[in-house]
Amino acid sequence: MLAERRLSIGIDLGGTSLRVGLFDSDFSRGISPLDSHSLRTRVEHGPEAVVSDMAGSIRRMLDAYHREHHYEVLVEGIGIGSPGPLNLEQGTLGHLPNFPGWDGFPLRGHLAEVTGSPVILECDANAAAVAEWKFGAGRLAQVDSLAMITLGTGVGSGLILNGRVWHGMVGMGGEVGHLCLNPLGPACGCGSRGCLEQYASANGLLRLAREQADGLNGSEALKELSNQTTGFTPLAVATLAEQGDASALCCFKELGSWLGLGLAGLINTLDLPLIIIGGGVASAWKLFAPTMFAGLREFSFVYRLGEPTQRQTLEKNRTFIRPAELGPAAGLLGAALLPVLSKTQLMVEAAT
Amino acid sequence: MLAERRLSIGIDLGGTSLRVGLFDSDFSRGISPLDSHSLRTRVEHGPEAVVSDMAGSIRRMLDAYHREHHYEVLVEGIGIGSPGPLNLEQGTLGHLPNFPGWDGFPLRGHLAEVTGSPVILECDANAAAVAEWKFGAGRLAQVDSLAMITLGTGVGSGLILNGRVWHGMVGMGGEVGHLCLNPLGPACGCGSRGCLEQYASANGLLRLAREQADGLNGSEALKELSNQTTGFTPLAVATLAEQGDASALCCFKELGSWLGLGLAGLINTLDLPLIIIGGGVASAWKLFAPTMFAGLREFSFVYRLGEPTQRQTLEKNRTFIRPAELGPAAGLLGAALLPVLSKTQLMVEAAT
């Protein structure tokens, strides 16, 4: 009789690439996938074709694993991290900007039918938060509540409250990227103005950099950079800042101030013990962290209450703000964690 | 043998008055107390004296009840709603502005010792939220998650998430009154600027009214009112607005816009199905509600997603924003509900 091996499958569905990973479901030998595939997401061929790609990948990985290791394989489940909005109750997609024609597609049911395995559908930001909580910046913190803010093209976020992913009423809980920081600020794609996303995302940073470059004190180097078409990236601005360009550094200082203001709102509302900052922009941590912490102190008395000097009053820990540790791998890992955690302490449920 | 009657005791501790109420613990015959006492809070005599007042009131009420009804009385527990900040884990008071010298007093333990009954200590705003949830504006909504915002001298708030009072890490969760709406706005007592409290509280309204009165378009009536010392109250401004004074109405319109912006942040963060607006200022609901809803729509795409026209996409209910129904009675009732609910579905716990 063959030895049995329990596996969990993660899927990270993006607008351009689709990643499928096979994991030991007890994660006892680390957090890297046993096997993984990365495919182009054939958005234009429709959702059925992409589900078929997912199922094909899973089948090939399981077959290869079985051939190589001769274990009896039991799939605990499949977790999918998908861009939102999602209808989590029904397991269907909402209107996803980068997936034209996919509205309402029953992704969870369809994949479960094709693969015969239980499927958990989750927003990608929440999947990443779960991974960072269990295996990344949160692994030593022993907390059951945290927020993860992802500073990417936009600003995403995932909330875990008392050990459960917080979905809110219609699965839109944790849209911290659209916290309004400045009602007279720049227009946001969500229809509002001055959202956190307008200041702390890659696009927000480029806007701040353009403003700096066009301003009276804009450095020549930043001006030159901002006139480039493909070269004008957050990474290039960060490199300039690290080389000592004051204008470029100023962009990150401004980003940090706004981010601190946004985090202050989150802490005043929820008094969380841990906030994890991820996404590409977060790699410039050293450039924006000082003003972020200054903003937090300025705008959140709840944060200040937790500072060491105040401990005599409340005798509790402070809120820790930490950079994410897993990078882009968090999405796939978090997706694979969902089926496992749903059987243990992590209850994935909607607010009623 | 005497019939047994289970009772619950609520205490509403305020800086000027102390209310103690005796309730049927199944609340089957309504939500009014069977008996209640209202005393002056002898803050200056220290916490032991006030605990002794509480215990004395409870004893007299129980004795009177027993004499009159001849029931065997079983006290399920005592709930106290107190101003914050509190250390809920230890059952002690933090630094309460209106209770000089009371810092660190072990209110929960002391009252339990003196009365021999189990005591639950809770922030007054959370106690009020519990009452409105179960017996007020939330009683027909069948929701397990909501926020209650109290527009009083300041702006208080209580959060209930998945059927539990949300305390956050150090019991400071739900400080929505200090959500920054305008980083360049007026200084707030919390050390920040432009907090919701600076716009949507009684004091905030009076500041808005003074600005209106001093402005170019300030009406004579509002100018006159704002120069009075004792007569210049939110109620007087509301009365003027109801009489058709455009300047006075403008104050409430502005208050509504800011409140809508604040609620938008709360909904974008938590996607709650219900927000209840209470406190004295909330009685001017008709004056500020139109701009509050306009602000909500403008600054929260999560709120807009729940609007009837969007239901096709997400097929869910909208967030309801409702005025509180219980008025100042909510604090005492909610306190009395705490011992009962803690034995059933309501888990009162801190985030870890």
Image: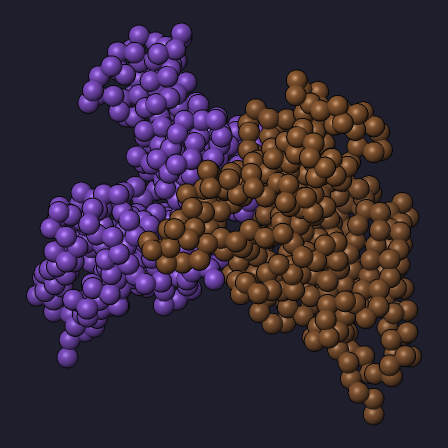
Chain colours: A brown, B purple
Residue nearer the viewer, B124 or B342: B124
Residue nearer the viewer, B273 or B139: B273
Q: Residue at x 39, y 61 (%)?
A: B348
In percent of width and height, residue A188 lies at 66, 31
In percent of width and height, residue A252 lies at 64, 36
Q: Please state, as top left, top right, bottom left or bottom right, where the N terminus of chain B lies in the image.
A: bottom left
The residue at the far front in this view is A244
Q: Quadrant of residue B93?
A: bottom left
Q: Residue at x 49, y 29 (%)?
A: B182
Question: Is residue B87 in sight in this rendering?
Answer: yes
In percent of width and height, residue B291 lies at 48, 26
Tell me: B156 left or right of B301: left
In percent of width and height, residue B27 lies at 29, 59
Reply above or below: B78 against A212.
below
Q: Quadrant of residue B278?
A: top left
Residue nearer the viewer, A283 or B127: A283
Counting the numbered discs, the total is 0
Tell me: B265 left or right of A26: left
Q: Residue at x 57, y 69 (%)?
A: A345
Residue nearer the viewer, B246 or B195: B195
Reply above or below: B120 against B324.
below
Tell me: B83 left or right of A21: left
Question: Is residue A179 in sight in this rendering?
Answer: no
Q: Residue at x 15, y 70 (%)?
A: B71
